[in-house]
Amino acid sequence: MRIGELARQSGVSVPTIKYYTREGLLPTGERTGPNQVQYAASHVRRLKLIRALIDVGGLSIAAAGEVLAEVDSPGRSVHSMLGTAQSAVSRSTPEPGDDEKWVSAEQEVEELVGRHGWAVKPENPGRQTLVQIVATYRDLDQGELLGLLDLYADAAGTLAPAELGVIARAPSSDGKAESTVLGTLLGDAAMAALRRIAQEDTSRRTQPEAR
C-alpha cells in the first residue's frame, strides 16, 4: 500500500508517519520507484503500537523509541522487556537520598516488600517511586493513606501473576514482546482509570449529597 492508504488504515497522518520514520520508530517501507514507497500490514500494526505507547501510555518519542528498540532486539527476554517498559513509565523516579526521612522510608518499603514475600532489586523503578511516596506521606502527616499501601500491594500481587500468565500464552516471541509492553504501560493506565471509576461509584453510594 502507498503512504496515503497507510495513513487511512492506521489513523495516523502522513506527516506524522514520516516523522516516526525519521525518528526510527517506524521501519521504512519498500522503495519501488524514485518517488514510490510501499508499506505492508505490519506497518499498520506498528503505527497502532506507537500510538498506544504515546497517546495512551503517555511516553515521549524518545522513551517510545527505547521501548520499541527492546521489542525489536533479537533474543530479548520477557524479564528484560519488562524492565525496559517499567523504566519507561518511571522517568521521574528520584535518585536515592541519604537523609533520615529517605532512609526511614526505604526501611518501610523494605518491610512491605518482605511482608508480601517479594524478591526485587533495590534499583527497581517502582520500588524507588514507592520510597518517595512513603517519604511524602510521612512528611505531610498522611499516615492514614500510608496504611493503604498493603491493600495496593495485595491487588498488585494478584494482578502480576495473571498479567505474566497472559504474556506467557502469547503464541510468538513478537506477541510476547507486544503483550509485555502494552500490559505494563497500558496496564498502569487501566488501573488508574478503573480506580477513578470505582472512587466515583463509592462516593455516590456513601455520600448522599453526591447523588
Image: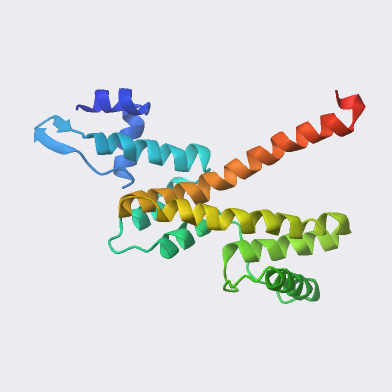
173 lies left or right of 157: left
Q: Nearer the viewer, residue 168 or 96?
A: 168
Please give the name of the residue rendered at 75% of the width and 60% of the height, measured from the top-left corner.
150
30 lies left or right of 169: left
> Is 123 located above or below residue 143 in the figure?
below
Residue 74: quadrant of the picture = bottom left
Q: Where is residue 142 drawn, in percent x and y?
A: 86, 56
Question: Is residue 82 in sight in this rendering?
Answer: yes
Q: Where is residue 19 drawn, in percent x and y?
A: 34, 38
Residue 119: quadrant of the picture = bottom right
> Is 17 located above or below residue 67 in the figure?
above
The C terminus sits in image quarter: top right
> Is 18 located above or below residue 123 in the figure?
above
Q: Where is residue 79 drawn, in percent x and y?
A: 44, 64
Residue 200: quadrant of the picture = top right
Please give the name of the residue rendered at 35% of the width and 27% of the height, measured from the top-left corner.
13
169 lies left or right of 117: left
Please give the name of the residue rendered at 41% of the width and 61% of the height, measured from the top-left corner.
78
The N terminus sits in image quarter: top left
Question: Is residue 88 in sight in this rendering?
Answer: no
Q: Nearer the viewer, residue 2 or 23?
A: 2
